Image (cartoon, rainbow, N blue to C red):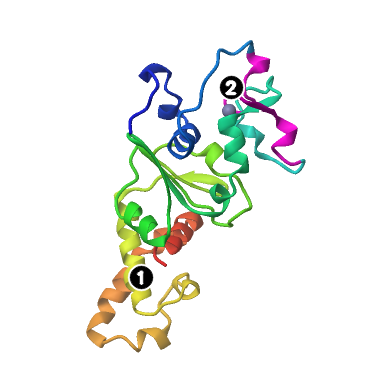
Amino acid sequence: MTSAYPSALDPTTTDVAWAAYTAAEGVPEIVEPAGRAAGCARCARTTAVMIPVGQVISRRFTGFESWTNLAGRRLCQVCVWLYRHRPLRTDAHIVTRDPVTLRSANPALLHQVLSTPVDADIAVIVPLRPGRKHLLPDARWGQVNVDDTSLTWTAADADRLQVMRRLRAHGFSETLLRDHSPAYPVLSRAAADQWPQIFDDWSRLDPWRQAGPWFDVGLRASR
Ligand SMILES: [Zn+2]
């Protein structure tokens, strides 16, 4: 499926959230805005159905940073869905813009997608503490979007994911993988001729050990 918008106006090319909505719910009807105050507080666009902000977000909501239209008092149907559709907050998702797709990602799919660099036509959403935060409203193309930040995912990260998976296959737990050297009780179960590879793999994960979110995403994608 390709987008139904003229390309220059197509919100799905710029806004991950709009692409996700379009893939899941269909193309929303955009209506001519009657001034900025009538537009959506988050995305500034106007759809056929608009709902007051206070009916959608709770009083404890803190995600206003990315809202582009603070004159707005309502949210469009796309942004209402973003905040109300609970699986978006609890499950990992993969969004693409050409074509427009949205997939819920189990560890196997997450692993598949993160086995190559994340390019500009894809956004990966990984709630590290499921349910705590809305990630899709702030998601960016070409990034892995996690609870408090967005990460690039390069070929080196894709390699580290394979390394992590190999080490897990030897029996190192998620906790042990964070240690600076391999735990002897697990190491001792591997054949001696595999030890050099294990030590080499272990040091290749060092950049991730010093970069928490990448490490956490790697764990999620290698379960
Ligand atoms: Zn909106």
How far apart are labels 2 and 1 at the CA level? 54 Å
Q: Amino acid at mark 1?
A: Trp
Main secondary structure found in the magenta portion: loop
Label 1 crowd bin: few (<14), some (14–19), many (20+), radius 10 Å:
many
Residue under numbered circle 2: 48
Q: Judge from the rendering whether residue 52 lies leftward or rightward of residue 31; answer left or right.
A: right
Mark 2, ligand 1, within 8 Å: the answer is: no
On-image quarter of the C terminus: bottom left
Q: In this rendered view, identify the residue nearer to me: 117 or 206.
A: 117
Mark 1 falls on what kind of element?
helix
Q: In this rendered view, identify the residue nearer to me: 183 or 175.
A: 175
Residue 150, relative to residue 194: is it above or below?
Answer: above
Q: Amino acid at mark 2?
A: Ala
On-image quarter of the N terminus: top left
Residue 163, relative to residue 56: is it above or below?
Answer: below
Residue 51 picture quarter: top right
Q: Which residues are magenta?
A: 36-58
